[in-house]
Image (spheres, helix red, strand yellow):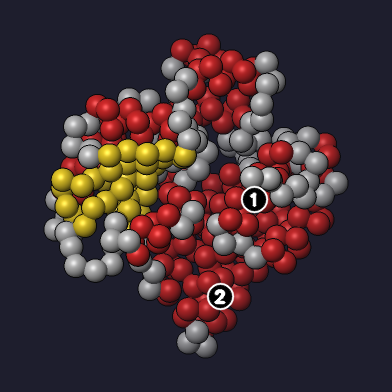
């Protein structure tokens, strides 16, 4: 499938594509991107502050419009705007380097808008906190429709996604219509677990996936004999490993398989292939809790 190419570099175009596929409106996306089109020509990393400025401004605009809707009793309309506001803010935050000024505040606004959208829109998703050895794993639980107990899928991130983007992939909604619940997780090294708790990647994915199974088995609407797992991108390594080492998983599937991620890093060091986010090496060392390149590659 072709990638929509608004900008002259892959990483910025990937962010636009993610936003479009996650429920963004094309007119709003063009309004955000047009003022920064030239900035993208300087490379994937250089213009990211301008990217955040434009996308955050649209997020703020939608939050204000949603507040007006809510005052007038238009809860569903407010939810729709807050949903897009959260999406644009998360996209803006995702494009920044670790420690960039305003990144934490932007992420906090995105989470607040997402939570408010859930409430006003009466959306089929519930925030869950699953205890881990250290801290907890934030998750979004989407319940299947119809009488239960239901099968359920644990849905994990790759390197640079978050549970909100997993939800916006529409897989939870599609599975719910088919009688399958979904648990979208911010596992260690991703989303809230990384940003708000400082939990780095645990490549032994069975450690945190087992905790998800423990939580699911305690839910009355879950069929414990039909728990599966899936993941995207680097989740194509995490999910198969978890299914292999946690015998309570009944099935597994991925988009797509990630057999040897160290090999992918060696290729990227040689500038073969494309990086998924700007400031790539700083991001992976942050996500893995690595002190330098040698430490990261060893992990």
Q: Residue at x 69, y 63 (%)?
A: 26
Q: Is residue 64 visible?
A: yes
- Residue 218 appears left or right of 151: left
Please determine whether, in this image, residue 68 is positioned above or below residue 21: below
Look at the numbered discs 2 and 1 and tell me whether their residues touch, using CB distance below 8 Å. Answer: no
Q: Residue at x 48, y 87 (%)?
A: 73
Residue 118 image offset from top left, x and y in percent: 41, 67
Tag of residue 66 = 2
Please determine whether, in this image, residue 120 is positioned above or below residue 182: below
Query: Which of the 4 quarters of the picture holds residue 282?
Result: top right
Q: Which residue is mark 1?
A: 17
Q: CA distance from mark 2 to mark 1?
A: 24 Å
- Residue 72 appears left or right of 126: right
> Could you say which is closer to the camera, residue 285 or residue 171?
171
Question: Which quarter shows the C terminus?
Answer: top left
The mark lying in front, picked from 2 and 1, is: 1
- Residue 233 appears left or right of 150: right
Number of numbered markers:
2
Residue 265 image offset from top left, x and y in percent: 57, 20
Query: Which of the 4 quarters of the picture holds residue 283?
Result: top right
Q: Residue at x 23, y 53 (%)?
A: 151
Please determine whether, in this image, residue 277 is positioned above or below residue 58: above
Task: Report helix, strand or loop for mark 2.
Answer: helix
Q: Residue at x 53, y 79 (%)?
A: 77
């Amino acid at each position: 499938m072709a990638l929509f190419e608004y900008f002259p570099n892959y990483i910025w175009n990937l962010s636009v594509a993610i936003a479009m596929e996650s429920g963004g409106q094309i007119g709003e996306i063009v309004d955000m991107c047009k003022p920064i089109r030239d900035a993208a020509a300087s490379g994937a990393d250089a213009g990211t502050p301008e990217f955040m400025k434009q996308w955050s401004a649209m997020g703020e605009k939608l939050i204000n419009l949603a507040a007006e809707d809510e005052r007038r009793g238009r809860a569903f309309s407010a939810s729709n705007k807050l949903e897009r506001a959260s999406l644009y803010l998360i996209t803006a935050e995702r494009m920044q380097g670790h420690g960039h000024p305003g990144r934490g505040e932007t992420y906090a606004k995105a989470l607040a808008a997402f939570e408010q959208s859930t409430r006003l829109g009466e959306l089929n998703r519930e925030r869950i906190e699953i205890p881990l050895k250290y801290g907890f794993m934030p998750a979004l639980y989407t319940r299947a429709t119809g009488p239960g107990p239901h099968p359920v899928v644990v849905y994990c991130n790759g390197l640079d996604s978050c549970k909100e983007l997993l939800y916006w992939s529409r897989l939870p909604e599609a599975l719910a219509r088919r009688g399958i619940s979904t648990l979208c997780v911010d596992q260690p090294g991703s989303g809230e677990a990384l940003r708000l708790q400082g939990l780095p990647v645990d490549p032994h994915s069975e450690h945190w996936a087992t905790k998800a199974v423990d939580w699911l088995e305690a839910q009355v609407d879950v069929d414990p004999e039909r728990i599966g797992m899936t993941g995207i991108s680097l989740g194509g390594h995490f999910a198969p490993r978890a299914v292999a080492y946690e015998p309570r998983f009944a099935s597994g599937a991925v988009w797509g398989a990630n057999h040897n991620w160290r090999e992918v890093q060696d290729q990227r060091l040689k500038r073969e292939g494309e990086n998924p986010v700007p400031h790539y090496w700083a991001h992976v060392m942050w996500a893995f809790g690595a002190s330098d390149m040698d430490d990261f590659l060893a992990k």
